Image (cartoon, rainbow, N blue to C red):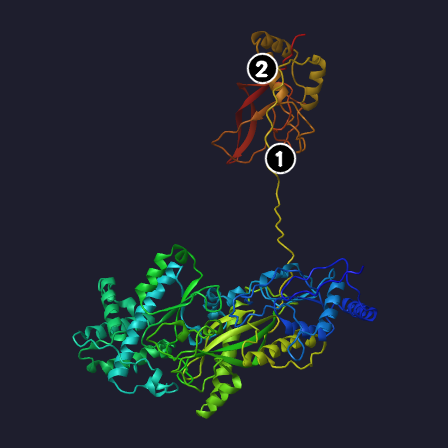
């Protein structure tokens, strides 16, 4: 009886069954032909995650999918490693027809083809998480949509650390497009944050005095691009009629700003160290308390009108060195972010220093983990109908050496559901992530012209700008600023990312726009969401994925192919990197050997040679001039020193000549039995002559070849005695008078010790 396999349920694992159901022969032959062609052309792909557009686009190009079994996906699954996911797509690999329903016939064909290539090697990988595929283990002809070590700019900590090195790559200042950011887990950066918070409180107080008591300031003249209802000062404060703050608060703020400017000009090095110019910790505590009363509670400053001009002048000076002064605002709000999380998880907005520091001290793991960052909040952004928004911009990197960046022409805006206000720190007002805003209902106080889905396309935003008379600022200020910020960020992280040639990666950058439409980079996300959560994303996300494949696949075959919405904005000059062949360490030298223990030979007395043989050997080295009484003298010495024979045996053995161990050539011995010692008082060159009683000796000059050698082996001990009655005579002429000079001679008596048998 034939067994039929039940149709796989949505979201369940598709297993490889041994007994397959009855399949139409024509469809099987067609599937085999397509699979064989795909294998031959290396068109086998693997997709992990809910990317139906990628699957459909690859199949249309003749690719065949190799499916891997995986656990069932929960309904609350969100894809994206460091990026906000707007909506869940629980169907992994679902192929929908034009009417939105499943095409069962096409799905069965694709399922059959995937079974035929289940043991084949994929040549294209598209995954959600970077760690799903080990890039180092891939071959050169295998492509993947991730780069290794890209976390140097796709995490908040990595982005903050990378942009601090921008000065080595570009003359631009990161403070002109990236809000100030500090790691609270690092002790030095925590102190820098405390100083920044206090200094920002001073500038905010000066700005408050100018705007409250000085009328329209230059910041207000250039910043009327937002709804006046959303201004921080428009909301009535709770008036404290019985409490006022003195002008010493303004004087302290002016003093701190002046010291900061002097430190930048290095004027503080000429100040006497004994003079204290900064506020003490207790004074800072009192200053911040009064600052909170004025800004947050609405307490009045008594007699502050006379300081308006001084505040204006100081703000003008600070504006030259602080590019973010326009967006700092009055409330001194900072946003605390976890360094590696996404979709707005764990983000908190705070405006009091003691609360932020207590949060760090209260949680030991929070304090030790340097992945938590605190970043200055942009309090005065560009608002659309009094509502805050941010911009999601895609860009594609196809190579890191040379750095090649593609910028997508379209983007979309994400709105908040609540009207903007700095008097509340609620996430529904300040966080525009769709994963957060979808849990809130639009406020009835929000402008009805805003969409209920809280999203605008780029064209809708340009129309709004054109209606307000600022249509040219988008192409003239916003787009070039975003492109420049992306390129400068990638340059700072280029040395940290592994430049694999067969890889590519699509990123999503989040920007906020200032009142002058200057973009401010918030973060860069890997694996940006592609879920069609709204009508805007349902149109743009499939187009981005299709255009990505055009750049990374179609353009490899045809360099002139259409790349869709992607435009090449940067291609770096190629830098030749020497091929890495591994660590090759070479140590040259000789090994240290363990010293050998000395070998002590037993004191054995060797058998003496006959006297005639020894005498003949000695006579060959020296001239024979010994008399007949010499042998009798030797016999007397042997009788006088009976113990000399044993000692001489040891010395003879140690002083014996070993030709195998000797490297220097043998030197001849002076063919004389005496050595002349000249008089020290007359050290001069002279010719030596032997006495006339030795006619067999010829006059010999003292040269290097006939000097006595210390390397001459001697078979016996030499006894030296001084005989002053004998000497050599030398003839010396001085002032024409012949003089005979006698020198003492060291007579060398050679005693040959013979051991009796």
Helix, strand or loop at label 1? It is: loop
Q: Nearer the viewer, mark 2 or mark 1?
A: 2
Q: CA distance from mark 2 to mark 1?
A: 33 Å
Under tag 2, what secondary structure? helix
Q: Is residue 401 visible?
A: no
Question: How many callouts does the rendering have?
Answer: 2
Position in image of residue 510 (x %, y %): 49, 75
**Residue in the foreground of this view, choosing between 562 and 350:** 350
| Quarter in which the C terminus is drawn | top right
Q: Where residue 408 sits in the image (x, y, percent)?
A: 57, 79
Is residue 317 visible to the viewer in this orientation of the structure? yes
* Crowding near the residue tagged with mark 1, few <14, some 14–19, many ≥20 C-alpha atoms within 10 Å: few
Depth check: give the residue in front, 263 or 102: 102
Do callouts 2 and 1 mark residues in contact (Cβ within 8 Å)? Answer: no
- Please determine whether, in this image, residue 754 is positioned above or below residue 494: above
* Residue 704 tag number: 1
**Foreground of the two, 376 or 1:** 1
- Horizontal arrangement in the rendering, residue 306 relative to residue 200 (left or right): left
Sequence-earlier tag: 2 or 1? 2
State the image quarter where residue 188 is shown: bottom left
Mark 2 surroundings within 10 Å by alpha-carbon count, few (fewer than 14), some (14 through 19), many (20 or more) = few
- Relative horizontal placement of residue 13, taking residue 728 as reference (left or right): right
> Would residue 214 appear left or right of 490 to someone viewing this image?
left
The spot of residue 275 in percent (x, y) is 22, 64
> Which residue occupies the foreground of this view, 319 or 741?
319
Residue 41 in which image quadrant = bottom right
Quarter that holds the N terminus: bottom right
- Residue 647, numbered label: 2
Residue 631 appears at what percent x and percent y? 64, 11
The residue drawn where x is 36% and y is 62% is 190
């Amino acid at each position: 009886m034939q067994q039929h396999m039940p149709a796989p349920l949505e979201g369940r694992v598709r297993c490889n069954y041994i007994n397959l159901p009855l399949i139409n022969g024509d469809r099987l032959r067609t599937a085999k032909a397509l699979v064989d062609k795909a294998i031959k052309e290396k068109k086998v792909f693997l997709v992990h995650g809910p990317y139906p557009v990628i699957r459909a686009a690859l199949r249309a190009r003749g690719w065949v999918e190799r499916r891997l079994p995986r656990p069932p996906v929960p309904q609350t699954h969100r894809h994206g490693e460091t990026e906000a996911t707007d909506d869940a797509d629980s169907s992994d690999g679902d192929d929908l027809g034009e009417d939105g329903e499943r095409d069962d016939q096409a799905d069965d064909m694709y399922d059959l083809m995937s079974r035929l290539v289940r043991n084949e090697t994929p040549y294209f990988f598209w995954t959600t998480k970077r760690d799903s595929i080990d890039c180092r283990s891939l071959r050169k002809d295998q492509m993947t949509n991730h780069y290794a070590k890209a976390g140097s700019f796709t995490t908040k900590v990595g982005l903050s650390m990378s942009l601090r090195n921008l000065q080595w790559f570009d003359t631009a200042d990161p403070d002109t497009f990236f809000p100030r950011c500090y790691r609270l887990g690092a002790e030095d950066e925590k102190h820098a944050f405390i100083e920044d918070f206090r200094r920002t409180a001073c500038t905010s107080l000066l700005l408050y005095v100018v705007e409250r008591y000085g009328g329209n300031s230059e910041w207000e003249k250039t910043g009327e691009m937002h709804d006046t209802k959303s201004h921080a000062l428009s909301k009535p404060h709770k008036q404290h009629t019985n409490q006022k703050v003195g002008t010493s608060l303004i004087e302290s703020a002016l003093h701190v700003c002046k010291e900061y400017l002097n430190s930048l000009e290095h004027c503080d090095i000429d100040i006497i160290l004994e003079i204290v110019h900064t506020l003490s910790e207790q004074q800072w505590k009192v200053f911040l308390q009064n600052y909170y009363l004025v800004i947050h509670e609405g307490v009045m400053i008594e007699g502050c009108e006379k300081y308006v001009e001084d505040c204006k002048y100081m703000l003008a000076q600070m504006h030259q060195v602080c590019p973010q002064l326009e967006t700092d605002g009055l409330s001194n709000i900072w946003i605390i972010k976890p360094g590696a999380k996404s979709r707005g998880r764990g983000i908190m907005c705070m405006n009091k220093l003691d609360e932020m520091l207590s949060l760090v001290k209260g949680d030991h793991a929070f304090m030790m983990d340097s992945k938590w960052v605190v970043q200055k909040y942009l309090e005065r952004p560009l608002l659309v109908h009094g509502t805050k928004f941010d911009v999601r911009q895609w860009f594609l990197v196809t190579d890191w050496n040379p750095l090649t960046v593609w910028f997508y022409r379209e983007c979309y805006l994400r709105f908040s559901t609540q009207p903007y206000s700095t008097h509340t720190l609620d996430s529904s007002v300040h966080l525009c992530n769709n994963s957060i805003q979808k849990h809130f209902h639009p406020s009835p106080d929000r402008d009805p012209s805003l969409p209920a889905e809280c999203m605008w396309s780029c064209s809708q935003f340009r129309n709004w700008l054109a209606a307000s008379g600022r249509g040219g600022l988008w192409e003239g200020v916003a787009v070039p600023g975003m492109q420049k910020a992306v390129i400068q960020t990638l340059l700072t992280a280029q040395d940290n990312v592994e430049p694999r040639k067969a890889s590519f990666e699509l990123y999503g950058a989040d920007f906020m726009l200032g009142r002058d439409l200057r973009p401010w980079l918030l973060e860069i996300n890997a694996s940006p969401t592609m879920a069609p959560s709204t009508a805007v994303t349902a149109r743009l996300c499939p187009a981005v994925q299709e255009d990505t494949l055009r750049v990374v696949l179609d353009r490899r075959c045809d360099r002139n192919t259409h790349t869709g919405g992607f435009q090449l904005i940067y291609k770096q000059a190629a830098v030749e990197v020497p091929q890495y062949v591994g660590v090759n360490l070479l140590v040259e030298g000789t090994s240290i050997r363990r010293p050998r223990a000395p070998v002590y030979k037993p004191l054995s007395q060797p058998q003496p040679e006959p006297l005639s043989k020894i005498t003949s050997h000695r006579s060959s080295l020296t001239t024979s001039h010994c008399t007949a009484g010499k042998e009798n003298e030797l016999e007397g010495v042997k009788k006088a020193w009976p113990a000399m024979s044993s000692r001489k045996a040891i010395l003879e053995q140690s002083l014996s000549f070993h030709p195998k161990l000797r490297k220097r050539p043998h030197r001849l011995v002076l063919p004389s039995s005496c050595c002349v010692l000249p008089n020290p008082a007359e050290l001069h060159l002279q010719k030596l002559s032997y006495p006339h009683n030795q006619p067999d000796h010829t006059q010999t000059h003292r040269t290097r070849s006939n000097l006595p050698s210390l390397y001459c082996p001697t078979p016996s001990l030499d006894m030296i005695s001084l005989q002053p009655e004998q000497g050599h005579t030398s003839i010396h002429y001085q002032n024409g008078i012949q003089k005979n000079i006698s020198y003492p001679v060291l007579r060398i008596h050679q005693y040959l010790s013979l051991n009796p048998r």
